[in-house]
Amino acid sequence: MAFAPPRSRLVIRRSLSNQVLRSPHPVLRVCRWRPARCVIYPEQETVPAPSSPVHALLKFLTTDVKSSVNMVDFGKWPLFTLLSPQEVASIRQACVFGTCANEVIYTTDSDEVFAFGQNCSNCLGTGDNQSTMTPRRLDVLCGKKITGISYGSGPHVLVCTEDGELFAWGHNGYNQLGNGNTVQGTVPVQICVDVLTKKVTQVACGSHHSMVLTSEGEVFAWGYNNCGQIGSGTTANQPVPRKVSAQLHTKAVIAVAAGPTCSMAITDNGQVYGWGYNGTGQLGVGGTGNQLIPCKVVFVQQVCIVQVVCGYSHTMGLTDQGYLYSWGANTNGQLGIGNKSNQLSPVIVETTERIVEIAACHSSHTSAAKSQSGQVYMWGPCRGQIILAPHLTNFTCTDDVFACFSNPPVMWRVLSVEPEDFLTVAESLKREFDSEETADLKFRVDGKDIHVHKAVLKIRCEHFRTMFQSHWNENSKEIIEIDQFTYPVYHAFLQYLYTDTVDLPPEDAIGLLDLATSYCENRLKKLCQHIIKRGITVENAFLLHSAAVRYEAKDLEDFCFKFCVNHLTGVTQTMAFWQMDGMLLKDFIMKAGQCGGFKN
């Protein structure tokens, strides 16, 4: 059933949280693991167990690891693969921009600002026109606590800070830096004319014009004005910031957005005004004539708009009741209305549930939206195809749509990562491993104690679930002696139950493989085999091969055998080879001969 707009013409103000529409599609949140050393992170597996509070806790544990809202996969933007894991982990804000998404500005958890990429028109602000694949520090902005970043097509860049300061740099052929000249800015420079005494709260860049919103609800614009996008009533370029008056003179503006050559503003009563280029109806005023001053967008019924975004030649608006409207060009299906007809006035986009966020970018035709249940939809051009109506994706945020399908794959907004000042259930569980303070059970191995929690072991391992039944002696013990395995092996096993990770050298992984086989832990067995494969050398190859045979790990056995044959001269000179059991050695020599290992 379509999520249709109300028939009443009255404006009904309602919090987005007042109405919950349930979706039949589950929301999947996937966080990208950060590998450390040779730690292996396996995929989660549902452990069969009857419905119970313990089972519910297990389900929460296995989903919580994957569902942190603060985890952002920057790897979807190729440029971030040039950074080290430590550098990526430090990012708090980032903006990918440029004609080919080939420039990046980002801030760190220590309020430092860096940039790297092609540096077209000095848009990196590094003081020169040299491209760089290594992040360079922008000293002028460090410690400023950036709150907004926007970019143009030149490109030029605007930045506002927590204190309301405004900085600009990059392309300036049309006065878009607002400094009164047309000289390119090689470093961030504070804009002082007319806005120095104002506190800037939002920045928006068109292709070659600039806009800012102040804390007092005023809009200032400057730069290229060939279509009236400055809102001054003329088409003369504006060299310094100028207040947009006319229809906005008595209005308090709460948000601004910019298309390539048009401008949009939302007032505090939910009305939308547009000005500038209107050749495809992107201003939503019912015609295609350019507007030199702000004009009110015409809606069929009275609505209260809370968000507006501009694409390359279309515009979208979101109401306070979660209804989505779009208008402007539609040759690429970017309006999401099921056809390719341009719309000169806002039309409703049919959705199955309430929308809480919309996304578009002035450098592409891609459109996206997020529903109240967390579903992300996209429409418009998609790798050679055209999507005419909102299409459900597997993404968890609208930013991913632009990373994967926008052309160019730029960011439609500054991507922010909130610092995690709390521990997830999985992180808390990991921290409590071998904690004497909270443990209720000890395993004693080689005279050393390992502190664990009986409930966790029962949840995570069928072997312990069986062991800790009332009729087993171990269920009443506070200390359990283990003599079948070494301390490093058993410690690694118990740690795996708390963390889902294995961190052992290949030689110890053999013992863990033995344990995994004994306890019927098939996933752990596969992890051990993976570690052994990654750590195989000429010196230990035959030892590892023998272990694979003993523990019936066929895949690992084949791998080690091929390695031994490929390095037969070296392997046959190791102590492990000649100390091996006679029958095993005989079988190896026979197999190696059959596959031609001794021909040379």
Image: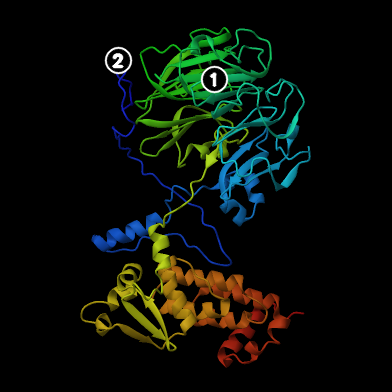
Distance (Cα) linking label 1 and label 2: 28 Å
Residue 553 pos. (x, y %): 50, 75
Residue 354 visible in the displayed image: yes
Q: Is residue 48 above or below residue 155?
A: below
Left or right placement of residue 468 versus residue 174 in this view: left
Residue 474 pos. (x, y %): 28, 83
Left or right placement of residue 233 versus residue 53 in this view: right
Amino acid type of the residue that numbered disc 2 sits on in the rendered structure? Leu
> What's the residue at 60%, 24% (across, down)?
195
> Which of marks 2 and 1 precedes in the sequence?
2
Q: Nearer the viewer, residue 457 or 389?
A: 457
Quarter location, residue 499: bottom left
Amino acid type of the residue that numbered disc 1 sits on in the rendered structure? Val
Q: Is residue 15 above or below residue 86?
A: above
Q: Is residue 249 above or below residue 537?
A: above
Residue 328 pos. (x, y %): 52, 16
Residue of label 2: 10
Residue 238 pos. (x, y %): 67, 15
Q: Which residue in the rendered view is the most extreme toward the front?
A: 197
> What's the residue at 59%, 71% (across, down)?
533
**Picture colour scheme:** rainbow
> What's the residue at 58%, 80% (across, down)?
544
Q: Nearer the viewer, residue 67 or 572?
A: 67
Quarter location, residue 404: top right
Left or right placement of residue 525 versus residue 105 in this view: left
> What label does residue 142 carry, if any?
none
| Disc 1 crowd, CA 10 A, few/some/many (<14, 14-19, 20+) | many
> What label does residue 219 carry, if any?
1
Q: Name the quarter where the N terminus is drawn.
A: top left
